[in-house]
Amino acid sequence: MPGDQVILLSLMALGVVARNALIVTAAGVVLILRVLALERFFPLLERRGLEAGLIFLLIAVLVPFATGEVGWAEIRQSFTSWTGLAAILGGIIAAVLSGYGVTLLQVKPEVIVGMVVGTILGVVLFKGIPVGPLAAAGFTAILLALVRGH
C-alpha cells in the first residue's frame, strides 16, 4: 500500500479514536479520490476547497439574519455592549492574523506541513476544530516573530 494511503488511513484511525467525524470524513474522501485515481480533482480542492468551506461557514453564520433571529436590535447591541465590542475586536484580530498568515504562506510555504500536523493534533488530542490554514498561519507568524524577537 502506498505511503500516502497509509497516512490517510492513519488519520482516519486517529479520527475514529478521537471520535472526530470531521477528520474521518475528510481523510476518507481524499483516500477514496486517491484510490479511484481521481487525483485530477486535487488541485481544484487545494485551490477552492478552503474557499468553498468558508462560503458554507458564512452561509451558516448568516442564516440567523435571514430567519429574523438576529435583527437591528442585536446588531446595535453588538456596538453598545462589552460582549459585542469584544466580539468585534476578536473579529478584527482574526482578520489581521489571517493577513499575517497569507504573507507567511507566501514567503515560507514549507510551514504548511507543520500546520497540518499541528491542526490534526489539536483536533484529535484537544478536541479542537480545524478553523483553517490562514488562522493557523497567522498564529504561526506571531509565534515566529516572538521567538525571533521582531
Image (tube, rainbow, N blue to C red):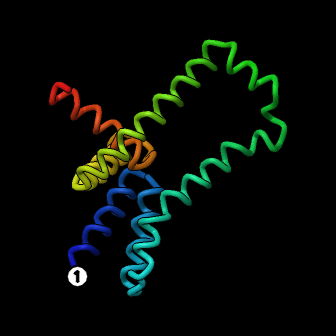
**Numbered-mark total:** 1
In the figure, is residue 113 to the left or right of 13? left
Residue 69 location, quadrant: top right
Residue 66 location, quadrant: top right
| Residue 45 percent across, percent down from the top left | 46, 69
Q: Residue furthest bottom?
A: 37
Q: Which residue is mark 1?
A: 1
Residue 127 appears in the figure: no
* Viewer-proximal residue among 121 and 46: 46
Q: Quadrant of the C terminus?
A: top left
| Residue 142 percent across, percent down from the top left | 29, 32
In the figure, is residue 3 to the left or right of 129? left
Residue, x 33% and y 45% (percent of image)?
Answer: 103
- Dot 1 crowding, Cα within 10 Å, few <14, some 14–19, many 20+: few
For numbered disc 1, what is the local secondary structure?
loop
Vertical order, 131 against 49 (above or below): above
| Residue 1 percent across, percent down from the top left | 23, 82
Residue, x 22% and y 80% (percent of image)?
Answer: 2
Residue, x 71% and y 43% (percent of image)?
Answer: 62
In the figure, is residue 105 to the left or right of 86? left
Vertical order, 30 against 65 (above or below): below
Name the kind of residue labelled 1 in the image.
Met
Vertical order, 101 against 76 (above or below): below
In the figure, is residue 109 to the left or right of 39? left
Residue, x 43% and y 52% (percent of image)?
Answer: 19
Q: Residue furthest right?
A: 68
Vertical order, 141 against 59 (above or below): above
Residue 137 appears in the figure: yes
* Viewer-proximal residue among 115 and 11: 115
